[in-house]
Image (cartoon, rainbow, N blue to C red):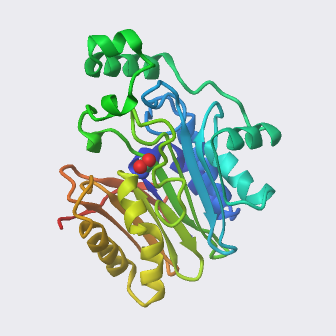
Amino acid sequence: MLLIANYEGRSGTNRAAEILASKENGLRAIIEGIKIVEANLDIHTVGMSSWPNILGELQLDAAVMDGTTRRTGAVGALRNFKHPVEVAYRIMTDIDHEILVGEGAERFAREIGAEIAKNETELSINTWHKHLNDVLTEEQKAKFPDVRLLDIKNKAVDPEKLFDTTVYLSIDHEARISSATSTSGWAWKYPGRLGDSPIIGAGSYADSRYGACACTHTGEMSIRAGTARSVVLYMKMGLSVADAVYEAARDLADLKTGYLDEVTIHAVDKSGNHKVIGLNSSEEIRYVIWQPGMEQPEIKVAEIVRL
Ligand code: GLY
């Protein structure tokens, strides 16, 4: 058994580890961990009280994958539900689609009785107002929101500091390998923007025959490189988990354009080995691990790879 989560997800890892240790389904374990992160008002990149899009709306993304069946569920640009990761799971279990977005996803969430929530908080709205105040011209302020949003987005401050995600990977007592993600995406994003978190193969992928991978930071990059699927495929082709992650990092670096720095790759193999690397990160990157023998999850430092 093994649990790997990124540092942003640390508030849910005790619960996820407890469920894994009690030999329950590993995908359900990581979903329950992520639900704690989604409800955590101190985390502003996942679930409630996250930084909204440029219109002040919180559009949330999430995905799950059961590596044994290779069924997935993903939800994009979901508004007004507390647990996008649970909605993603129900897409996997209740409908013959793999991804729902926007109004259709909201209709589905209502039909399954998902918990409704106003995810925008005073803090998230005040922070958005401050951002608008900083970036809008006086003319734009007078007309907002009837302005050309493209003009505002281009003034965003350092995009590499504007978002995170939570990602979890698990191997359970039946050797089922699972992945799950949840995020509010890129702060002040253009409405409708999806990052890698709801895109299976980009932000996450799990295959119980080989391993699993999940990425954080600028989703545009892992979408372009197909990072999570690549890592698992490299393991299928015989690379160790570390070499698979290094190879996927080289694929990312070869993109040359975009916000590459600080993309972080988390991966596990079917034997319970793992590797976490941060690309060109200027700061230390931490992650959480739990495996049998540990009383509780532990924080570790990822390798920084410079390419
Ligand atoms: N990795 C999260 C996102 O790009 O939305």
Quadrant position of residue 302? bottom left
Count all numbered tags in the image, as a single digit.
Answer: 0
* Residue 220 placement (x, y as % from top left): 38, 54
* Residue 179 placement (x, y as % from top left): 56, 62
Residue reaching furthest bottom?
Answer: 238
**Which quadrant is home to the C terminus?**
bottom left
Q: Residue at x 48, y 16 (%)?
A: 122
**Which quadrant is home to the N terminus?**
bottom right
Quadrant position of residue 228? bottom left
As displayed, is residue 147 above or below residue 274? above
Residue 2 at least partly seen: no
Q: Residue at x 51, y 40 (%)?
A: 192
As displayed, is residue 277 above or below residue 109? below
Question: Is residue 36 found left or right of 136 in the rendered image?
Answer: right
Q: Residue at x 68, y 38 (%)?
A: 103
As displayed, is residue 187 above or below residue 258? above
Q: Residue at x 62, y 76 (%)?
A: 175
* Residue 204 placement (x, y as % from top left): 50, 63
Residue 187 at least partly seen: yes
Question: Is residue 198 found left or right of 221 in the rendered image?
Answer: right
Quadrant position of residue 102? top right
* Residue 49 placement (x, y as % from top left): 50, 28
- Residue closer to the observer: 216 or 153: 153
